[in-house]
Amino acid sequence: GQQVMQIPQYQHVQEGEDFTTYCNSSTTLSNIQWYKQRPGGHPVFLIQLVKSGEVKKQKRLTFQFGEAKKNSSLHITATQTTDVGTYFCAGLPSQAGTALIFGKGTTLSVSS
Amino acid sequence: DAGVIQSPRHEVTEMGQEVTLRCKPISGHNSLFWYRQTMMRGLELLIYFNNNVPIDDSGMPEDRFSAKMPNASFSTLKIQPSEPRDSAVYFCASSPPGAGYNEQFFGPGTRLTVL
């Protein structure tokens, strides 16, 4: 079936270091969304990318959607302890009537 | 404004018992999703509704699971009989109508423990 793979599963960084998580789909996507889940919390929407090659920034976070619309990445510059949590990508396959497919997430821990 | 409301927040039950989880989506949203989250399997979509109609229930694990949405403001997920492997956090999410695919707003979740 259709899958969205996300790597790495876990990442530990020192505060101030950069962090990147990658997302790959087995099929072409209409769009991709990113969510953040704090420990003990629920997923919260961060952003949606729609266009091939699209790049969007939110302060220290940079999101990219691949040219083939099958992969995406989230890069955090100069991590802070507030960035701790699990980051999920969720892709919407091009096939009509299909729901979002979530990756398994990358859990980020940051030590100060 | 109230977000997605789920009840109960925590549920501890014994194997074989019936469990009913409840969800109230955000007013005006017309899509509702039920997810299950575990360490091993991550976030799994169980079923989703559009305008109160089930669109895709292929993620429902087995016949012990059933979901209903009798109206636009209420949905239930029932497990009967429950088993220890059903222990997980169950999230409900809703999204508004509109062109393209909209963000999903998640509720706080119900942490279910089946002993």
Image: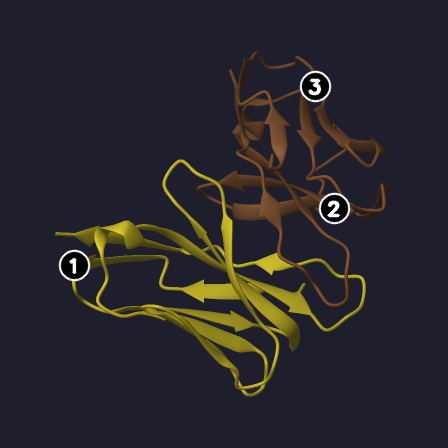
- Give the letter of the chain under mark 2: B
Q: Amino acid at mark 3?
A: Pro
Which chain did the image draw in brown?
B
Q: Amino acid at mark 2?
A: His
- Kindly report which numbered mark, 2 or 1, lies closer to the viewer in this rendering: 2
Please determine if labels 2 and 3 lie on a single subunit: yes
Q: What color does chain A have in the rendering?
A: yellow
SS class, disc 2: loop
* Location of residue B73 (image quadrant): top right
Q: Amino acid at mark 1?
A: Glu
The residue to which callout 1 is attached is A15
SS class, disc 3: loop
A29 and A34: which is toward the camera: A34
**What residue is at 51 percent from the left and 72 percent from the top?**
A24
- Give the letter of the chain under mark 3: B
Residue B105 at what x, y percent from top left? 60, 47
The residue to which callout 3 is attached is B81
Say whether marks 2 and 1 touch (CB < 8 Å).
no
Residue A8 at what x, y percent from top left? 35, 63
> Relative to residue A66, is residue A18 depicted above or below?
above
The residue to which callout 2 is attached is B29
Residue B64 at what x, y percent from top left? 74, 27
Q: CA distance from mark 3 to mark 1?
A: 47 Å
**What residue is at 77 percent from the left and 55 percent from the top?**
B97
- Kindly report which numbered mark, 3 or 1, lies closer to the viewer in this rendering: 1
Residue B66 is at least partly visible in this image: no
